[in-house]
Amino acid sequence: MSTRQSRKLEHIAYSLKLSDGPGTTGLEDLVLVHNCLPELDLADIDLRTSVAGLAFPCPVYLNALTGGARDVTEINRQLARAARACAIPMAVGSQAAALEDAAVRESFRVVRDEYPEGILLANIGGGATVPEACAAVEMIKADALQIHLNVAQELAMREGDRTFRGYAENIGTITAQAGVPVLAKEVGFGMAGEQATQLLQLGVAAIDVGGSGGTNFACIETARITDTTPSFLGFWGIPTAVSLIEVVTAVAGKTDVLASGGLRSALDLAKALSLGAKAVGIAAPCLQLLQHRGLEALIAYLTNLKFELRCIMLLTGAASVAELQRKPLIIRGSTEQWLKKRGIDTSCFAHRT
Ligand code: FNR
């Protein structure tokens, strides 16, 4: 088994062992304003959304987790079954291993086999070539391509990359030639408004902020080396709520924004959607539920999450994701302080009607 393949298995093992954090997402600083007269029925709540021109039946998606080792084929099969049962889009994990070794391609292809009608996202790193990007898309007949940005993770990884020049230009080239919409995503350290503006100029069809407060790859990589945490980068990164507001403000509607990183409850999802995310991704909790409690438990979790999201939308008086983005939202605490220092006025969220 290659180093890359054994790393995939260790990521799964440590993700199951470690909890989120140590920092928070900042979503605890946000309050959606209750509406006691919503004049809506639960059946009125429409979860449909669109991302990068693709029609998502629901704004929740299963974010990139795994693939690239023979032992994870079964995990991907089960994740795809859960995504299909709940009609949610799904991203696969980095396909770099399968681009190197044909023997592990099945661990990705199984996702398309299980979910033929699903919206599936391929996944590669920022240093991939155009032929590699196209091969990753073709491997799972993907509807879109995620390019993951994980510099902090690589630096925390003993065997990780140490050279990161040229990624921006490369992303622009892939975006122009991939043949499917390209989404740039962080893996849990967040994005600042400045890099969102750069990505917008590079032509990406959507940006997934991948903020901090959830899965922490600095801690996972440190635990792989020493079996201890925290990591020197344990508190590094931009909390999901802060990152989302920075990115939404920076791109000003010119590209779609997605939220992920530590989204754990329907209330988290609703807050992120209200801040301007077109869709919201969840990764580690799905893997943990599947591995600890099985496929039926994962399906029940996702089904319930959709039900609770619809309830919360109703309680704000919003019948759609677009309406939720016009409902008042209070932003307090360290999230407000950060944004104020960065010149972003949060009072406009409180006064939305
Ligand atoms: C990931 N994630 C990830 N992301 C990516 O773009 N390519 C990948 O190969 C992987 N692999 C991977 C493995 C495991 C075990 C985990 C838990 C996560 C990152 C994932 O898509 C997401 O960005 C982060 O996990 C943050 O979301 P959560 O876990 O806090 O919901």
Image: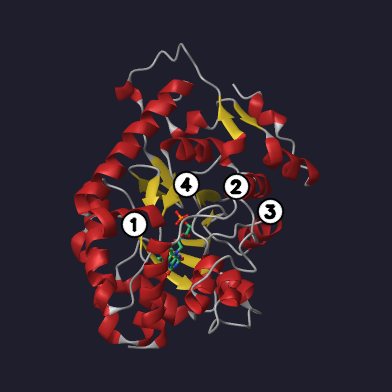
Q: Which mark is residue 288?
A: 1
Q: Residue at x 49, y 55 (%)?
A: 20
Distance, label 2 to label 3, CA atoms, is: 9 Å
* 91 relative position to 114: left or right: right
Location of the N terminus (image quadrant)? bottom left
The mark lying in front, picked from 3 and 4, is: 4
Q: Residue at x 52, y 36 (%)?
A: 271
The local secondary structure at tag 4 comes to: loop
The local secondary structure at tag 2 comes to: helix
**Which amino acid type is shown beneath numbered disc 1?**
Gln
The mark lying in front, picked from 1 and 4, is: 1
* 83 relative position to 8: left or right: left
N-terminal of the pair, mark 1 or mark 2, is: 2
The residue singled out by tag 2 in the image is: 244
N-terminal of the pair, mark 1 or mark 4, is: 4
The mark lying in front, picked from 2 and 4, is: 4
Location of the C terminus (image quadrant)? top right
The local secondary structure at tag 1 comes to: helix
Q: Which mark is residue 232?
A: none
**Which amino acid type is shown beneath numbered disc 2?**
Leu
Q: Residue at x 34, y 57 (%)?
A: 288
Q: Is residue 178 visible?
A: no
Q: Which mark is residue 193?
A: 3
N-terminal of the pair, mark 1 or mark 3, is: 3
**Which amino acid type is shown beneath numbered disc 3?**
Gly
